[in-house]
Image (tube, coloured by chain):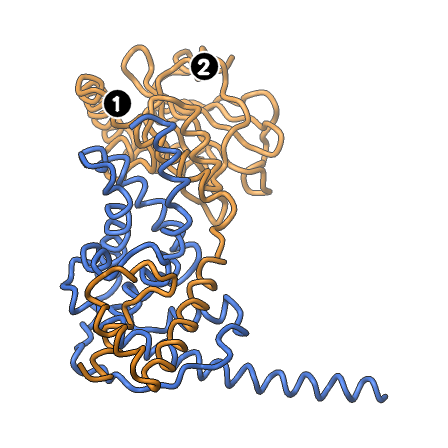
Chain colours: A orange, B blue
């Protein structure tokens, strides 16, 4: 074995000495003990490697990464627990909603809604038509809220009581003109869907918003929008104001 | 796997995975995303792994595959012809200990990707050359070759950074002297 070959092998030798008992290194190590030039190279090489290992081990992960991993995976696990029957029910509900949506949505767009609201309804429409996918899925709305928070998307401090009782399906984070908007979709007991939209208070989103819900019925959709602290909340469903009203308490 | 076991798995490996991801990706955000995605994949597929002692290897292999998958999607990058990369005899920078962690990481990230992955795994100190070969799914000889060439590239990068850092230090000392006399 010449020095070049020995160097080739010793480059794989870890500086902590963990590989000392590996027979692959035996001959190269012996050669390094015999040959002063190779020994010097090896000592410097180990020193260099130890310094690099030390530098690398000093890198700390960003704050919150661990929590994001745990929160995100919890949601993934919940999504797996959705049994086949539930999936079929959701698919059926989405199909019915999509059919109705496609009939109404194209003809009558909600003229009295602000830009961000129209955009949010488009996002919802695209979800129910299966043209886009949820960012996270869970039957627990609390987990979806945590996921949105962990991903810096707007999330309500407290879900409306009657919404909190519903089974959630999934959530999606998007933005309108640079303002983050999030949507959580829920299953209603009658098989339909209801959607909770949250965005931040900005001059564009807060126009006319008050602490009491303002209900708008247009194009087959009913929305109720109100201000809650620094957030604007909108509940939306395809149906009448009477169908939405129970969820406003 | 229950929640406690999963949490233990995350605590054991997320830091090293993040460091590996950081050496591969363009930014801290990409590295965090890769690390997160790896655990998502564990949650959805890792449960099929019967031998739990292989969880660490599974996580590192998955992170690397995920990195390659994203990279392929981003662009059709030309495969580096390993034969064309010259392994040069580069003297070891004498002041490597004096180089800060950020500079060392920067130099590591400048090493061509096929060499960077085995090199980072080597410097994480948790894997032997055989384990690195298993993780990256390449022959042992290839790992040794990539370590050898990767280290040569890294030393080159560090040497040039050390030189530019040295120049900056001279200028700084000169200014200090002027101020104290003024």
The residue labelled by disc 2 is A247
- Residue A26 is left or right of residue A219, and the answer is left
Furthest-right residue in this view? B182
Q: Measure the alpha-carbon separation of dots 2 and 1.
A: 26 Å
The residue depicted at 73 percent of the width and 86 percent of the height is B175
Residue B154 against residue A214 in the figure, above or below = below
User: Could you say which quadrant of the image residue B106 lies in?
Assistant: bottom left
- Residue A91 is left or right of residue B12, and the answer is left
The residue depicted at 21 percent of the width and 73 percent of the height is A27
User: Residue B114 in the image: x percent, y percent?
Assistant: 24, 68
Could you tell me which secondary element the residue under label 1 belongs to? helix
User: Residue A160 in the image: x percent, y percent?
Assistant: 50, 18
Residue A211 against residue A67 in the figure, above or below = above
Residue A115 visible in this rendered orientation of the protein? no
Q: Quadrant of the N terminus of chain A?
A: bottom left
The residue depicted at 24 percent of the width and 35 percent of the height is B44
Q: Nearer the viewer, residue B173 or A135?
A: B173
The residue depicted at 86 percent of the width and 88 percent of the height is B182
């Amino acid at each position: 074995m010449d020095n070049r070959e020995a160097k080739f092998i010793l480059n794989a030798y870890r500086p902590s000495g963990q590989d000392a008992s590996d027979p692959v290194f035996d001959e190269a190590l012996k050669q390094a003990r015999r040959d002063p030039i190779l020994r010097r190279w090896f000592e410097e090489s180990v020193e260099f490697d130890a310094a690099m290992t030390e530098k690398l081990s000093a890198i700390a992960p960003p704050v919150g990464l661990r929590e994001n991993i745990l929160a995100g995976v919890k949601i993934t696990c919940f999504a797996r627990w959705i049994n086949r029957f539930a999936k079929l029910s959701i698919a059926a509900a989405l199909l019915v909603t999509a059919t109705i949506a496609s009939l109404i949505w194209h003809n009558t767009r909600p003229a009295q809604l602000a830009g961000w609201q129209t955009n949010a309804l488009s996002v919802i429409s695209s979800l129910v038509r299966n043209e886009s996918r949820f960012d996270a899925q869970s039957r627990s709305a609390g987990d979806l809220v945590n996921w949105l928070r962990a991903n810096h998307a707007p999330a309500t401090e407290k879900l409306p009581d009657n919404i909190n009782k519903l089974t959630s399906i999934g959530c999606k984070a998007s933005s309108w003109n640079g303002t983050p908007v999030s949507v959580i979709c829920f299953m209603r007991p009658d098989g339909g869907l209801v959607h909770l939209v949250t965005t931040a208070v900005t001059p564009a989103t807060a126009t006319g918003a008050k602490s009491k819900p303002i209900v708008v019925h247009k194009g087959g959709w009913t929305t109720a929008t109100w201000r809650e602290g620094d957030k604007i909340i909108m509940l939306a469903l395809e149906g009448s104001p009477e169908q939405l009203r129970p969820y406003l308490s | 796997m229950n929640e406690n076991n999963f949490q233990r798995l995350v605590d054991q490996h997320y830091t090293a995975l993040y460091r590996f991801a950081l050496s591969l990706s363009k930014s801290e955000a990409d590295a965090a995303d890769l690390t997160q995605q790896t655990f998502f994949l564990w949650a959805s597929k890792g449960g099929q792994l019967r031998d739990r002692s292989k969880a660490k290897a599974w996580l590192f292999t998955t992170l690397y595959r995920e990195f390659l998958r994203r990279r392929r999607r981003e662009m059709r990058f030309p495969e580096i012809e390993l034969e064309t990369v010259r392994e040069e005899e580069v003297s070891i920078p004498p002041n490597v200990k004096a180089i800060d962690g950020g500079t060392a990481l920067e130099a590591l990230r400048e090493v061509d990707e096929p060499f960077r992955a085995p090199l980072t795994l080597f410097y994480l100190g948790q894997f032997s050359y055989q384990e690195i070969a298993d993780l990256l799914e390449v022959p042992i000889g290839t790992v040794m070759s990539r370590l050898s060439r990767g280290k040569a590239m890294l030393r080159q990068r560090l040497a040039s950074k050390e030189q530019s850092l040295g120049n900056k230090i001279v200028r700084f000392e000169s200014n200090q002297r002027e101020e104290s006399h003024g």
